[in-house]
Image (tube, helix red, strand yellow):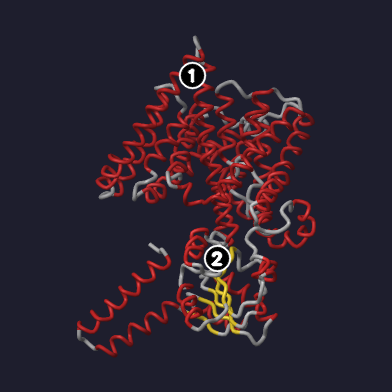
Amino acid sequence: MDVFLEISLIIGIATLIAFLMRLLRQPLVVGYILTGIIVGPYFLNLIASRDYIELFSKLGIAILLFIIGLSLRLDIIREVGKISIIAGLGQVIATSILGYVIMRALHFAEVPSIYAALALTFSSTIIIFKLLSDKGDLNKLYGKIAIGLLLVQDIFAAVVLLVISVFGLSSAAHGNIPLYALSLLFKGALFFALLYLTGKHILPKLSNFFARSQELLFLFSMCWGLGLAAVFYLFGFSLEIGALSAGVALASSNFSDEIGSRMKPLRDFFILLFFVFLGSQIVFPDLHSVALPAILLSLFVLIGNPIIVIVLMNLLGYKRRTAFQVGLTVAQISEFSLILMALGFSFGQVPEDVVSLITLVGIITITASTYLVQHSEKIYPAVKDFLWLFEWRKKPKHMPAEHDTRDRDMIIFGYDRVGYDFVNVAQKMNINYLVVDFNPTSIKKMERARIPHIFGDAEDAEFLDEISVARAKIVVSTIPEFKANMSLVHYYRNRNPGGIVIVISHSIKDAHELYRRGASFVVMPHYLGARFASRMIESHGLEPAGFEMEKKRHLMDLERRQHLTGEA
């Protein structure tokens, strides 16, 4: 069959399967793998030009890893915070050890068991980011922790790919294997030193020049990503680690987001062929022999991984609900897992049946976890009474001290946005107040300023009970999310019909809904800002001197706010 006709048929079938996946609200990657199984030797057997499709799939992996590298900025450790680092690394270590034990208990060989155990540790940043974005939960406490945890996993996965690239190639080489490995390590250290210097001093200037033309920026990005992958390959490394390194080198560029967005359509096309090719390679020599391992490993990922994260989150001082929601986000394996298995297969270290097994686990866990994350709020009430089994730290670390559990007259949710103004008023009026925030940076600012505060989530009803929100005389929320404010207003108004609750909204429709739910007042920043500016025109007319005076007052206020809050 002509290769053009072959790829056209594959894309047509992939489109039909993707349409079905969309109806079932499943990630498209599941549809791509199922497409590979359908066009593979067990069903339609359409893939005759395997070399061409394998080449396209390698391009897809290179582009995917290049885009992932663009998001792995060197300062990511500071961004995700201590919690995500500890939870992420703790989960990786625990899952890999337990995964290896399970694989060995199922009588798999040692090296494939190591590969499989590592594959089970990685969760899909892309899938979870999309699910949380669709739910509007990216800015919630558990959403921030989950994305940070997944980014830590991605960094660990990049290190694993590098190590396997070095030792996998060295074991496949002829001659002195230790000497070959040392040679690759030396060349790798040299390459990364050169990349660091290039990314810091040369690439920013080049990207600024190429950014003058969108087409030229796209072409430069393709040249840099695929070119560096080819250079790494020529010097004995894998294409995968070269493409990832190319992305990391450009991550600090001002145009990294734009480069990533322009590369995504190309990535989506070629990565489709990678997962189709992967699906077509799935072998089931004996369905009975692979069914039990697939079920056991899937249950381990779907149940064991969340339990590991729940325990870690509890030990770090987080509430049951937050720990549960973060735990559900790691209940699947990722694209990195499948790339890792494909890499091991290409080095001859992982047999085809183990690759098929992990791919099958990927299909099961990605499908199931999608529903778990989407319906986490409905699942939590059904399981919360059992979660105490994993609460090894009985008193959460972020609760107020024993001597400071008195009721507050005023509770403010959110400090950095406009919470500072409400804190200022509370201090001037000598009101007994408490600030609630889940941003570690905000917590540190309030610690330095000696502002009464607590780490928590406005949507966690158990947390609201513990800090006695219902007994506060006035509750203020500076949180911009409509869903969070609706939940808070509903909670407070049902328990305190006569209290005052002030929230923020950026939409007239949402403001009406918040008023209907029982809000005392809805602050609309754009409305208030425009009204203030219009009154300035009314007061000063067309005289520039009046506006210059207002400008100086505003700058003085901004400087004072920046000094007190540390806001950039």
- Horizontally, residue 561 falls left or right of residue 402, namely left
Q: Amino acid at mark 2?
A: Asp
Residue lying farthest top? Answer: 175
| Residue 482 location (% of width, % of height) | 55, 72
- Horizontally, residue 511 falls left or right of residue 203, namely right
**Where residue 200 is drawn, which disc sits there?**
none
| Residue 434 location (% of width, % of height) | 57, 73
Number of numbered markers: 2
Q: Can you say whether 356 is above or below 85 in the image?
A: above
**In the figure, residue 168 lies in which quadrant?**
top right
**Where residue 437 is drawn, which disc sits there?**
2
Which residue lies at the image location 59% right of the left edge and 31% below the top edge?
341
Element assignment for label 1? helix
Cα–Cα gap, marks 2 and 1:
49 Å
**In the figure, residue 373 lies in which quadrant?**
bottom right
Q: Which residue is mark 1?
A: 181
Q: Can you say whether 521 is above or below 10 in the image?
A: below
Instruction: Using the image as rendered, state which of residue 464 and residue 10 is in the foreground.
Output: 464
Which residue lies at the image location 28% right of the left edge and 39% below the top edge?
202
- Of the 4 image quadrants, the one containing the C terminus is bottom left
Which residue lies at the image location 57% right of the left edge and 43% below the top edge?
14
Between discs 2 and 1, the one toward the N terminus: 1
Instruction: Using the image as rendered, state which of residue 282 and residue 382 is in the foreground.
Output: 382
Q: Amino acid at mark 1?
A: Ala
Which residue lies at the image location 65% right of the left edge and 54% below the top edge?
24
Report if the CB atoms under discs 2 and 1 are less than 8 Å apart: no
| Residue 73 location (% of width, % of height) | 43, 45
